[in-house]
Image (tube, rainbow, N blue to C red):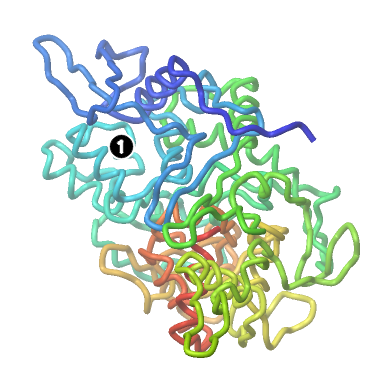
């Protein structure tokens, strides 16, 4: 394997990176073909727009080096590139159409996604002119007024508050259901176009993908081939992830960036090749220190060397290549940290025991959380795509029953589940609610997002979404497709409640500590 290096770009290259990235996604820039605005990069400055006599001048701060640790609430994350550097000339950073680039919604310092805190800074520094704020999908409705700054704040409220992009999709033709009613606080959604608000998935760790997009709509199917689900009749096969990503890159530029023409084949190839060089993971913890020391294997370098292929460690059929049964120990990074919270020295005559250091106590908590993630059993019930479709019904499982891909925690095949995230009972007032009626039975169900059913038109697919990867999780809050969990603690609480797991306060804290260390 080629040697992987942590390499910071030279100062000039870093300036070019900032110019390209921020010119494509900050400071109110527009397509370079139609804009006369001047862009200047100022080291250490806050981004702001300075209005001159003739044209606006965008004054932008230099973006953080993506190949250096980027701080977050739990410590810091690090991106590694298998090429050793970031190619800032890659079309991933090229502003197109409405001024957006891929980097507009996939920021290197935000886990290659976007989050409310940094979006708020971009909004404030650009007076809402940053290209990420576009009505086509950044607003609560494409008809929302944006003439004033206050109107912009209201129009982009879901983007600013939860980092949500609006996906507009029509009800599928010949669907097994119809739209019975819609409660849209923004008075736009209809059967012609439902408004589905979703988090941008990260453009890193793509080596471990089995499906593309939350609802898998960019996962290309195939009539046959190597990527076919086992134990499924009729056969269900998929094209390579590489081909799916090529298609997705072009669709993103035509849709999100509103480009007038397709990407060239060379541009598509360059974007996908760039994305597939990136590996991102938490590298340090604010309480446990370095996550790749004292025998631990955290950080992006071990991740980049982790094996992955279609069907690896599949829960249902076992490993597609080796034939070995499913192994529930999916993530094994912190085994060396078990029991580090024990006293360093036993009590001696007249002397109390020497306690473990705070760092070792924190490390032991992460190791306990890893064991909980892999092995804490609970009943998995009422999950469409799981209880009704797997070859053998399972009465008990663990977190890894769904997060089965070793080292990353995604699904190793394109299988989607409905755990109830989009259920009406969880709908917040700022999201639409759709009531769907089964054409055959008359049964109704209400959801804030029909999920995979918007692609397949099948009743059984309502509310089903892909299983996302878990590495670098802390860098890209909030969580779930709809941003409904602001913190990892809330994410843990959701599953504890949904499946009646019964975590103790210590177990919940340990599991959260582990997830933050990924």
Residue designated by label 1 = 134
Please say if 164 is above or below 119. Answer: below
Q: In the image, 293: left or right of 59?
A: right
Q: Is residue 384 visible?
A: no
Q: Position of residue 297 (x, y in %)?
A: 65, 55
Image quarter for residue 180? bottom left
Quarter placement of the N terminus? top right
- Which residue in the rendered view is the most extreme toward the left? 53
The residue under the point 53% across, 50% down is 283
Quarter placement of the C terminus? bottom right
Image quarter for residue 187? bottom left
Q: Position of residue 324 (x, y in %)?
A: 88, 68
Secondary structure, mark 1, is loop
Q: Is residue 391 visible?
A: yes
Along the line of sight, the residue nearer the viewer: 251 or 506:
506
Image quarter for residue 56? top left
How many marks do you count on the picture? 1
- Which residue in the rendered view is the most extreme toward the front? 349
The residue under the point 51% across, 73% down is 356
Along the line of sight, the residue nearer the viewer: 329 or 398:
329
Q: Position of residue 437 (x, y in %)?
A: 47, 74
Along the line of sight, the residue nearer the viewer: 370 or 487:
370
Along the line of sight, the residue nearer the viewer: 314 or 158:
314
Q: In the image, 220: left or right of 31?
A: right
The residue under the point 72% across, 59% down is 413
Say few, some or many: other residues with alpha carbon within 10 Å of mark 1 (under 14 / 14 to 19 / 20 or more). many
Q: Position of residue 150 (x, y in %)?
A: 11, 44
């Amino acid at each position: 394997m080629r040697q992987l290096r942590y390499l910071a770009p030279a100062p000039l290259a870093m300036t070019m990176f900032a110019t390209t990235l921020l010119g494509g996604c900050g400071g109110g820039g527009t397509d370079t073909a139609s804009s006369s605005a001047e862009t200047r990069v100022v080291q250490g400055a806050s981004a702001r727009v300075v209005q001159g006599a003739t044209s606006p001048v965008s004054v932008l701060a230099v973006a953080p080096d993506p190949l250096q640790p980027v701080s977050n609430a739990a410590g810091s994350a690090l991106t590694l590139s298998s090429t050793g550097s970031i190619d800032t000339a890659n079309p991933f950073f090229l502003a197109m159409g409405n001024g957006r680039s891929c980097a507009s919604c996939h920021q290197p310092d935000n886990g290659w996604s976007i989050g409310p805190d940094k979006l708020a800074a971009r909004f404030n520094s650009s007076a809402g002119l940053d290209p990420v704020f576009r009505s086509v999908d950044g607003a609560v409705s494409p008809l929302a007024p944006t003439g004033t700054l206050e109107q912009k704040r209201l129009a982009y409220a879901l983007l600013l508050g939860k980092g949500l992009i609006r996906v507009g999709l029509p009800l599928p033709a010949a669907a097994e259901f119809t739209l019975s009613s819609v409660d849209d606080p923004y008075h736009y959604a209809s059967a012609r176009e439902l408004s589905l608000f979703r988090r941008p998935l990260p453009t890193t760790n793509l080596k471990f993908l089995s499906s593309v997009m939350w609802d898998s709509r960019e996962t290309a199917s195939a009539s046959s081939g190597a990527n076919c689900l086992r134990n499924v009749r009729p056969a269900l096969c998929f094209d390579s992830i590489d081909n799916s990503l090529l298609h997705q890159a072009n669709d993103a530029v035509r849709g999100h960036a509103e480009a007038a023409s397709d990407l060239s084949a060379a541009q598509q190839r360059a974007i996908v090749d760039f994305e597939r060089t990136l590996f991102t993971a938490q590298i340090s913890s604010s309480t446990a220190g370095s996550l790749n020391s004292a025998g631990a294997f955290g950080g992006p370098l071990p991740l980049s060397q982790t094996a992955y292929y279609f069907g690896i460690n599949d829960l249902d059929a076992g490993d597609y290549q080796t034939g070995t049964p499913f192994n529930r120990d999916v993530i094994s990074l912190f085994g060396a940290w078990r029991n580090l919270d024990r006293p360093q020295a036993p009590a001696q005559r007249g002397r109390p025991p020497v306690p473990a250091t705070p760092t070792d106590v924190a490390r032991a908590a992460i190791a306990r959380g890893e064991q909980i993630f892999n092995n804490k059993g609970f009943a998995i019930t009422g999950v469409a795509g799981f209880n009704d479709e797997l070859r053998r019904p399972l009465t008990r499982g663990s977190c890894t029953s769904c997060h089965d891909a070793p080292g990353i925690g995604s699904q190793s095949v394109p299988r989607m589940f409905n755990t109830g995230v989009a259920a009406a009972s969880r709908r917040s007032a700022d999201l639409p609610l759709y009531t769907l009626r089964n054409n055959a039975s008359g049964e109704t169900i209400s959801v804030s997002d029909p999920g995979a059913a918007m692609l397949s038109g099948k009743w059984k697919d309502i509310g089903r979404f892909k299983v996302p990867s878990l590495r670098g999780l802390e860098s890209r809050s909030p969580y779930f497709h709809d941003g409904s969990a602001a913190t990892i603690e809330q994410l843990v609480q959701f599953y504890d409640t949904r499946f009646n797991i019964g975590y103790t306060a210590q177990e919940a804290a340990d599991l959260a500590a582990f997830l933050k260390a990924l």
